[in-house]
Amino acid sequence: MPTKRIWLTVLSGYLLLAAIVCAILLFGRVETVDEHYAFHQEEIPEGADTVTLSIDCLALDGRLDELSSSVRNELPDGLVYLPETRFLYTEGMTAFDLLLRAEKPARLRIAYRSVFGGTFYVSSINDLAEFSAGGESGWIVLVNGAFIDRSASAYPLSPGDAVEWRYTVSYGDVLPPELLSE
């Protein structure tokens, strides 16, 4: 009989372990280092490589009547979705990767689609889409204050870069003259 008792003890131990693992998987939240620091930026180690991200639609100030009521209701207070915020830099990170990293902590809904060559096009952020405010409106990306010359998903970042996603109502207001003449 001692063998049966040992076997039952081992079995009950495995069942308890399985129950704990199931509880962790169902109710626990396992996060990567990047996810942790995205939600707890104050804990980013001093001297760590970081990049910053901001997202706004300040160009809509005074033009809200041009938007549908459903889009207008989704706009953030002050027309800023995310003030300049630090994120941990990772090797190979693109401006698009950084935007996606901010999606959960900033409570954003980012709609994008694959275009060509494995790149992606951001069509809307929280339902504010291209052409929502007229024929020349949409999302633009600047890195270190300069308009980027390719898809954000093909634009590699370096430590210290500052990425800005801005909604514009007229591309002519933000694009450099050389791009407007093409």
Image: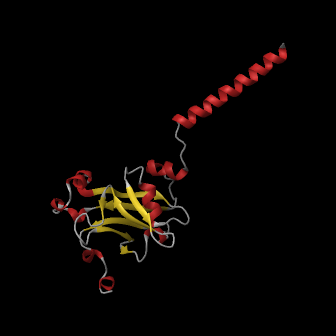
Q: From the viewer's perspective, is residue 178 above or below residue 143?
A: below
Quarter of the figure with residue 112: bottom left
The colour scheme used here is: secondary structure
Q: Looking at this view, is 72 or 149 the one in front?
A: 72
What residue sits 50% from the left and 50% below the top? 35
| Residue 24: image location, x then y, percent | 57, 35
Quarter of the figure with residue 100: bottom left
Q: Looking at this view, is 52 or 115 the one in front?
A: 115
Q: From the viewer's perspective, is residue 50 above or below residue 41?
A: below
- Quadrant containing the C terminus is bottom left
Q: Please, which residue is most extreme toward the top here?
A: 1
| Residue 64: image location, x then y, percent | 18, 59
| Left or right: 9 as drawn, with respect to 167 | right
| Residue 43: image location, x then y, percent | 48, 49
Q: From the viewer's perspective, is residue 11 above or below residue 34?
A: above
Quarter of the figure with residue 62: bottom left
| Left or right: 19 as drawn, with respect to 48 | right
- Quadrant containing the N terminus is top right
Q: Looking at this view, is 64 or 135 the one in front?
A: 135
| Left or right: 90 as drawn, with respect to 99 | right
What residue sits 47% from the left and 68% below the top? 153
| Residue 92: image location, x then y, percent | 55, 66
Q: How many labels does the image show?
A: 0
